[in-house]
Amino acid sequence: MRFLLLGVPLSVALLGPWLVPDDLVRGAPFADSGLLGTDFVGRDVWHQVLLGGQGLVLTAVLATGGAYLLGVAWGLAAATTPRVVDEVLMRPLDILMAVPSLLLLLVVATLAPGGALVWIVMLVHLPDIARLVRACALEIGSRPAAEAMRMQGENRWRIATGFVAPAMARVLATDAGTRLTGSLYLIAAVSFLGVGVPPDSSDWAVMVDRNRGGLFLNAWAVLAPALLIVMLAVGLNLTLDRMPEKADHDRS
């Protein structure tokens, strides 16, 4: 079931733009023509669904992946360096956490080009990821195996990358589902509010916002993109949550 929940929206998002014909035409708003009818400006809803998910998915994946690359390195550095360096690395993140994430996204999306959205979502997730990695690394770094590596003369970076980082992989894999879902939520929320995107752009969240006025005329113009967003979020969480269990089963 989880593969179906994840596979359907991912397939539509990634492969959909290749299936849309070049000669798109417009009809009457909220008409019954086509597979799912038309939207508020007369475009085919099915074609808009095929076009509307790629940007959302790619932006969420890039932002979450970038946040983990930076956050893991940041947290490991804080956990394996002297206390003074730890304080210098972690205190700016406390300031960043004090800024409401959605407010930050709305301001930047209004003032900056669309590409900045990836960087802002990365910054939103960075403090939590770095703090999680630091906490895990401090606990793992105090285990007997880490102490034995120190006694053998291994340097801090070798211990961090060779022992500490692999030991926290299960925690990070479980957390990744929540972070990726959070990225989808933030990006969809900004698009739904119409900030930084054209009012008639092909985007699932924009479709929900722009077509809700005609919900009783053509419900599919709202339900189709909304269901795909929900399926993607649930499917991601279920799949990533089961990955550590599968890894344990394979090792046994």
Image (cartoon, rainbow, N blue to C red):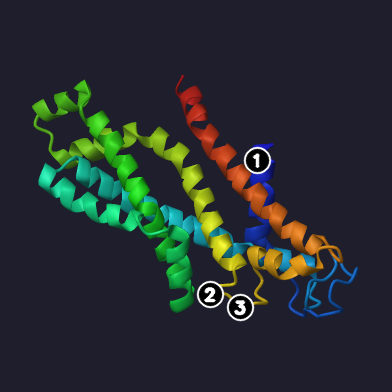
Asked which secondary structure carries label 1, the reply is: helix
Q: Mark 2 points at which residue?
A: 196
Quadrant location of residue 67? bottom left
- Say whether residue 129 is left or right of residue 89: right
- Say whether residue 129 is left or right of residue 146: right
Amino acid type at image mark 1: Phe
Crowd rating for badge 1 (residues with CA inside 10 Å; few <14, some 14–19, many 20+): few
Of residues 27 and 92, the one nearer the viewer is: 92
Q: Which mark is residue 90?
A: none
Measured in 3D between alpha carbons, the distance from the residue under mark 2 to the one under mark 3, in whole angstroms, is: 7 Å
Q: Which of marks 1 and 3 is nearer the N terminus?
A: 1
What residue do we see at 32% from left, 54% from top?
70
Q: Mark 3 points at which residue?
A: 198
Q: Mark 1 points at which residue?
A: 3
Asked which secondary structure carries label 3, the reply is: loop
Measured in 3D between alpha carbons, the distance from the residue under mark 1 to the one under mark 3, in whole angstroms, is: 33 Å
Measured in 3D between alpha carbons, the distance from the residue under mark 2 to the one under mark 1, in whole angstroms, is: 32 Å
Of residues 11 and 99, the one nearer the viewer is: 99
Amino acid type at image mark 2: Gly
- Say whether residue 114 is left or right of residue 38: left
Is label 1 or label 3 in front? 3
Of residues 59 and 250, the one nearer the viewer is: 59
What residue do we see at 84% from left, 76% from top?
29
